[in-house]
Image (cartoon, coloured by chain):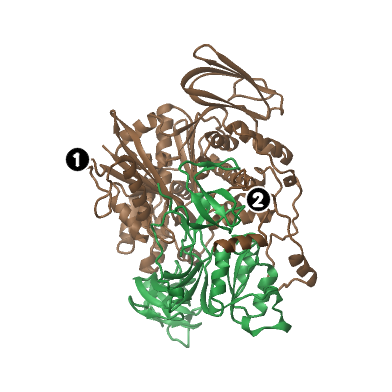
Chain colours: A green, B brown
Amino acid sequence: MPHYPEQRYVSRSTVIRREVSLPEEATGVITAKESQRVDIREVIAQGVRPSRHVILDVAQQLGLRRPSDAERFMLVNVGDVVDVQAIAGRSATRGKRVFSPVKGIVIYIGNGQVIIQEMPQIIDLEAGVRGRIAQVIAGKSAVIETTGAQLQGVWGNDRRTIAVLRIEPEAGIESIVQEQLDMKYLGAVVVTKRSLKPLTMSVMEEQGIAGIIAPSMDYSLVEMALKTNGAILLTEGFGNTRMSRPVLNLLTEFEGQQVTLDAYQPRNWDTRRPEIIVNTTTPKGGENPSRPNIMLTLRSGMNVRITREPYTGQTARVIDLPKNPILLDNGLRVPSAQVELAGGEIVYVPLANLEVLGR
Amino acid sequence: MSILSVDFGSVNTRAVLIDIVDGTYQLVARAQTRTTDGFPVNDLTVGLDRVLRELGDTTGRTLTGPDGKVMTPERPDRSGVDIFTATASIGRPLRAVIVGLMPQFSVMSAIRAATGTYIQVTETIHLDDQRTEQERFNTIILNYPDLIIIAGGTEKGAKSAVMELVELVRLAVSLTDASRRPSVIFAGNTELESAILTAFEGITPVLIAQNVRPSLNEEALKAAQNQLAQAFDLYKEKRSTDFAAITAMSKNGVLPTAQSYNTVVTYLTQTRKHNVLALDIGSAASVLAAGIQGNVETAIRTELGLGHNALTLLKTVGLEAIRRWLPFQISDLELTNYAANKLLRPATIPTTLRETYLEHALLRAAIVALLNAARPTWKHPQTDKFELLIAAGAALTGVGNAGYTALLILDTLRPTGVTQLYSDPFGLIAALGSIAAVQPEAVVHLLETDNLEYLGTSFNLSGIPRLDKPALKVKITLENGDSVEQTVMGGHLFVYQLPIGQKAQVQVNNVARGGSLGGKRRIRQTVIGGRLIFDARGEPSALSLEQRFTQMPMWIAEATGDPVLPLDPRWLEVVDEDEDPFPMPLGNKPAKADHRRLFGRSRPTAPTTSTTPTAPAKAGRDELDDLRDATLS
């Protein structure tokens, strides 16, 4: 059977279909319409996250015998926004009254009770890319289609930013200290070739760097990364892996351009990936943007990226695809490809450990 | 009658084609591909199409029509199939809130019913929970459940207390946005059924099941489990159009894969009068079904997995539970980095020796955790004598060597006495569970004709035999009268490969002090063909690090017949833990001394092995690697 390899896009010119979704727990509306053109910062959906509810037993607090009697003493209606104020009583200003302890929305009146939902968190969802709305899934998401460069990473800290891309100084991000502040990194997305360290994140916060694209970091830094205000995206994984050459090459190519850095944090049950998108109006080098090929099969001659030790991050060329599983040096016998590494070394790598980077 | 069954796992989509050959149902062909719910496809039906194409290529049959759907029934030209069924374990489990009267009765029974499918019980609400009405209300609203399971009230028992809780649930559900309202399953006092249906009419769908706790001393989970399976299907169908398309094609919707384990183990334990244990360690979830003296208990753990849930597994079992299965020193950081990378790329396979031990340590710890959690729910929790063990899941069945798979099972399940070991590399159990409801005869034929992969028969010594001292005396007498005699030393395995179809008489004597062969001193057994494994290791997880360092590579060699792959002695050196595995709060900028530490020293990297004999070992990347990369990019 043909092998359909994992695809993780590192492409300078491709057709990008980007699904922008409201959080799963939120309810809301997609305000954009199909075929509508949207800009990067344009709000295309609005929603709210459910918040805590307060149940007030009005009948009991007013000392009423029958819960249904409470209706006559209501000072608010369903849908009203209330502050810390009287919501029931003979008068809003005098006598025995029931007060709302929170600011919120009255969502239920009945059976002698009032239920107030605390003011919910409102979500304004931005498009994140310049493009055309290809599909609207009511109340959930919109798919935006555009062309440009796309680079998919592996992990993000759940932040998003749109900023100019910069490559780190020769001495690394850590060299951007206050007294030598170079304004070009202020508010920028900075690419580092090195594994992320705590100091890098501190410098990021102190120097107002909007985002960092790094190859890797130790898992122990996740909590710290999640607390930083800037967006952090990893291209390779956890540990001390360096950035693979095709990734660095592509990012270098777009230095000085505005990029959308969507440092989405992968969840167990989600297939969305963190990514960097560069909207390009004219394809580079006369290339027509390609569409991701969902039927792409692994073939001899293809360039691939290896995703596991001892060759993590290295690119290689597929030489052969043996029909039978190969006995590896670790004692496992698994379906593998014979690949040639950059230095000419020829090794077997499990098919499951190869990624195609797109065009 | 031809049957096609497809199982959608988090990583793999597997299909089997079953047909009548010489009067019995047989496995005709199988196919497997990566599950296609992620980039760039985002459509399960593409994976379905791929496996069907492969089955078509293998058998010469056309299985789909011009509309891309599975053709049913089978046409005279043998295109299509008579029955198409589907199972799935993919995606996020359903979030459920359980509402009942008493935690130790109705709530507990509802929880046990929920363990039969992919459900994550996020909260329980009951009369003893010490919550106010408002807190209960918020518990329902803020847990965003997909499902609310209401139990409570024995038959002819409590009504008003149940209805008070139901009224709260009704209010919370009715005030939830219509697009996000959870379904409700009622499995309590049957006298309340019509009141429940009325309460939720026009608000949300209600599924009614038999009372899970008809009396305080009685439990009836089957009907509730069936309704939970239906809720699983409805939920998935509602959430994705591709899932709905598969449901529409399938004879009986899309069933949870885990229920198949229950069905198959029930059949095997009841027909063969054996204790049977089947386990599936998947990327996102794990299943263990135990059939003991005719009673079957199935447990699903949605937090134990080797890919999507590797990190959750690590957090659940703890780092020490993993280290117990490693023959080398390892830092917390290396372990967590490894598990976190598995989450990012769940389908990848270890290629260095060190990472292979790491992967299998996670696997072994997952099995032990699964078993330990399941045992208390068994009617006979101390049971360790299983005549039949079945292993599934790519990490167990995909090592490429039956002996290796057998070793991983024996290490962790530690059966006593004589055990037949099988694996299910093709996803047949998933298929059989879904077929059982529509063509039970096929299930009987397939299970009676050994369509699972036979790994061998193991003779297991319990206790802790003395290392390198005689523990088992084995005599294998072949049909022609020839015999093989072997003394198996403590701490070792002896594997004898009996030619296929050849019958032999096996006699095993326990000569270890304090050891036992399933409670006996001596075992005599007739066996037919296959691998005979004599396991005199005792308790593998009880060894010291140094013992594991020398013995684990030897066990693998003894089980597989491959040469011993020696470990690097430097791996026994205590790991420099100066890298802090715990997070540093923001704002605590390192002092200058820290700055030097972070950037002035390099951490020692663990030695690795290459994947071919010609490839030199690489300790990490260097500047030359970049130059090499540049030539390719």
Please provide percent x and percent y for residue B479: 49, 14
Please provide percent x and percent y for residue A17: 40, 69
Determine the image quadrant of residue B181: bottom left
Same-subunit check for callouts 1 and 2: yes
- Which residue does the numbered mark 1 point to in the structure image? B76
**Gap between marks 1 and 2 measured at Cα:** 59 Å
Vertical side of B297 occupied by B229: above or below: below
- Which residue does the numbered mark 2 point to in the structure image? B319
- Neighbours of disc 1 within 10 Å: few (<14), some (14-19), many (20+): few
Name the residue at 38% across, 41% down: B30
| 1 or 2: mark nearer the eye | 1
Residue type (three-letter) at the residue carrying disc 2: Leu
Determine the image quadrant of residue B238: bottom left
Residue type (three-letter) at the residue carrying disc 1: Pro
Please provide percent x and percent y for residue A264: 52, 68
Name the residue at 49% across, 71% down: A52
Vertical side of B480 occupied by A28: above or below: below
Q: Is A96 or A174 nearer to us in this picture?
A: A174
Name the residue at 62% across, 52% down: A310
Q: Is A138 or B351 nearer to us in this picture?
A: B351
Res. B437 in view? no
Q: Is B176 or B455 nearer to us in this picture?
A: B455
Vertical side of B576 occupied by A204: above or below: below
- Provide the secondary structure element on which disc 2 rests: helix
Q: Residue lying at the far right in this picture: please name it.
A: B593
Numbered label attached to residue B153:
none
